[in-house]
Amino acid sequence: MNSNTENSQIIDANSVFKKALLPITNYLNSLNKCLHAEALSQLILNTFLNVSDSLIAIGDEEYGKTLTNKDFDIKRKYSFNYLLPESFKDVMLIHRDVFLQLQISQSKKQESLVDEEAIQQHFLESNAILQKAISTLVDKIRDEQTNFLQSNKKIKQKISRIKHQQNPWGVYKKQFLSIQKQIQEIKDSAHNLSKVILVFEDIKSHTQTICNSLTEELERSKQSINGILHSLQNTQELSKITGTIAQVESALSNLELQNLYQENYALDIESKIVNLTENNIPVSSEDGLLLIKRIDFAKSTKRWLNYMLLPDLIELWQNRMNVISFYKHNLLNLKSSLSLLKNNNNLDALSSQIQSLQVLLQSVHTNENLQNKLIAQIQENLNDNFQVTRIYKTDDFLKISLQSSLTQFTSSKNNFFKDVQRKFKSLLSFFSTKYKTSTVRHPFKRLEAASKCIDYRTFKTLDIHYDSLFLNKNFIGDLFLVPREYEQQKLQENLQMWQKGHNKAVLVVGNRLSGKSSFIESVTKNFFKKNSIILTPNSKFSIEGRKFKTTKNLAEALQQIKKNTYNSRPIVVIDNLELWRDKEQSLLENTRAAIQFIETESNHVFVIISTSNTMQSHLDKRIPFTHSFSSIIDVNKSKFEEIHKAILLRHGASHQNLVTEKGLPLPNKQLELNIQKLCKNYEYNLGEVLQAWTYSINTTDANNIVYTEQEYDFEDFFTSEEAIILKFVLLYQHINEIVLKNFLGSRYDSSYKSGLKRLTNTKVFLRNSEGNLVVNPVLYHDIRSILKYRGVLN
């Protein structure tokens, strides 16, 4: 290379160095003038990304010259395609990480977790880091510009090493573009997170409003009682008693439960979280990599509220109802006493009424302290744990893990597990050392085994489309209903005799998942079509064009049917009899009403009632329940052929291949053996077998379904109190804290509350959309078997 060409290349290289330095030094000046965090974020997002675009353009230009010019200066190639890109990549990573931390700080500011002073201090430190990084880059470029004119041995050695290496510019450029994209993703995720924070704040505000309303309601009650007390203390004449009685009546009317917070809360919260979506959120960086969490905010939020907040709110609402009932009882007594004083024209007993009111005010103070304690607990839980920015912590976002639940339970609920451990140790001491390890199993081991079983059986997202064919009858439609020929024939015979004038009523029994509802729905559609009345609690039904609304009072609904069926002979279906109950109307009263209806009306109304085998046995001990029906159809067990056909129908609809773990087609004989084994394990209960089929199924990328026989046993870890709660839920299908407290009275807090919490935390109980607790569907069979073995169930 001659001297003129060399000088020309040096001049050209210097101009490129200056071209690279200009936007960087301008950006450094902008950093020096930046005054707050938001401005710094915008500076990175706009100016710095423009700087990176400029340097990428320079790198592209220099790389292009190396391709077209064989005599291109290798030292220049080393500077612009090797050395400077490596330094600039470090600067880009620093900017990306600082930008992420700035967005995190803004999110924490939005949740009021940090103040302005902390934000400003964070900004100053972030700005200083960026200035140092840019200054180092400027010095690096200037040093390289100076070194470009030198020819010392060290530089020659570096250049000689790259002579036979492939130019890395393409890799660097790809990395630069990736980092630019990540910065944009951080910006977008921060925008999405801001919307989520607004929803969380709305939920907190709504909950706080309810708490404030309850506090104000209690304060108004206290003022009313104080006013009545003041009026009584100043009553010297009988004529003033009338005014005091009017005050008492006004206080009673104000105590009516007008705001049904509990009934509306679940719907209100559902409407708020419905807009939450699943998002990818960058949360931190490690070794240059951006770590991203994918969070389903709607699912996580709803689950956390159900497990962590709703039980405390239910306790608060229960306290409210107890307080109101107590006040109303005392005020009604006071009203009666004052009316008696007025009628007797005697004020001698007035002092005792004043004393009773003073006692009532002391109770107001006690209940106020309890309510404030509950509200403080709810507020603390929301403020400390219900935060969107918990996503940036290492643990899972709003996760309700078994271990954390048990840890919290152990530390806060009377050291229950420590007591268990103590009792267990004393039990071990009774046995000799020889039998210690072989005859006794620690309750925690059983609990861990049960937790593994629940986790194994929980439906997997990857298999959800296949599993839905086996678990959701509304999705699969009537074409997948396998007819129960014997049961249908038996019902049809009863129907034919009824049509000839005989009194007929049919009881359909079967445990959960056995297919009672599907069977009744099928025969109703086939035999009656339009002339059928389906009764369910809190719904509507039609009789000859007239519409009626049901409550939990079955007698009222049956009376309407009796009055309005002169011109027709319909079928009346009462599916799941055990659901007809509330605090006003017991199941026993509703059952007696149904039996009375059968006895008087079954000659022109064909009655079908369904319930579980367990409830049938329970009712038979109280009243002649089963004997009231002309026929019993038990659908609890299905034939092997029916179950086999049901599985093949559903599997065929998936259009996937059933294979072994080795990828080979599953032989028909092996398939039959697998189904036979499931039938025996789950006592030929059709729904249980269909559900259990999904436990052993895994979907692969090759559109194959792999059947594996792995299974975990569900261990009995229940206390005697928990077994009683489970029996109640198996009988009545669901429960909540208020019902159980009303049912058990003072024993609830002392013996059963902790057990209910543990059943919820271990996911033996799940909370449905109405706020009630139901048995986890994957555990029906095991829990029934455990309670039967213990003798709790017949």
Image: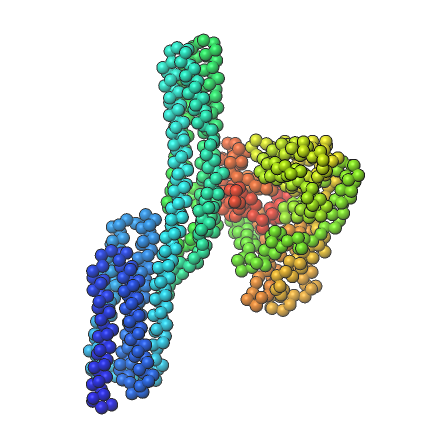
Determine which quarter of the picture holds residue 204. Answer: top left
647 vs 347: above or below: below
Q: Residue at x 58, y 50 (%)?
A: 778
148 displayed left or right of 188: left
Question: Residue, x 36% and y 56% (percent of image)?
Answer: 190
State left or right for residue 771 relative to residue 355: right
Percent position of residue 208, x then y: 39, 40
- Please give the name of the residue rendered at 72% of the width and 46% of the height, measured from the top-left corner: 527
**Rendering quarter of residue 178:** bottom left
Q: Residue at x 62, y 32 (%)?
A: 556
Q: Is residue 156 above or below residue 296?
A: below
Query: From the image, which quarter does the N terminus lie in?
Result: bottom left
Vertically, is 115 above or below 498? below
Percent x, y of residue 548:
61, 36
Q: Is residue 265 left or right of residue 137?
A: right
Q: Quadrant of residue 367?
A: top left
Q: The C terminus is located in which quarter?
A: top right
- Front-most of 425 and 739? 739
Percent of width and height locating residue 712: 58, 55
Residue projecting furthest to the top: 345
Count of numbered tags = 0
Which residue lies most toward the bottom here?
2
Nearer to the camera, 192 or 286? 192
Q: Is residue 161 visible?
A: no
Residue 600 percent location from the top left of the image = 72, 31
Residue 49 visible here:
yes
Q: Nearer the viewer, residue 201 or 356?
A: 201
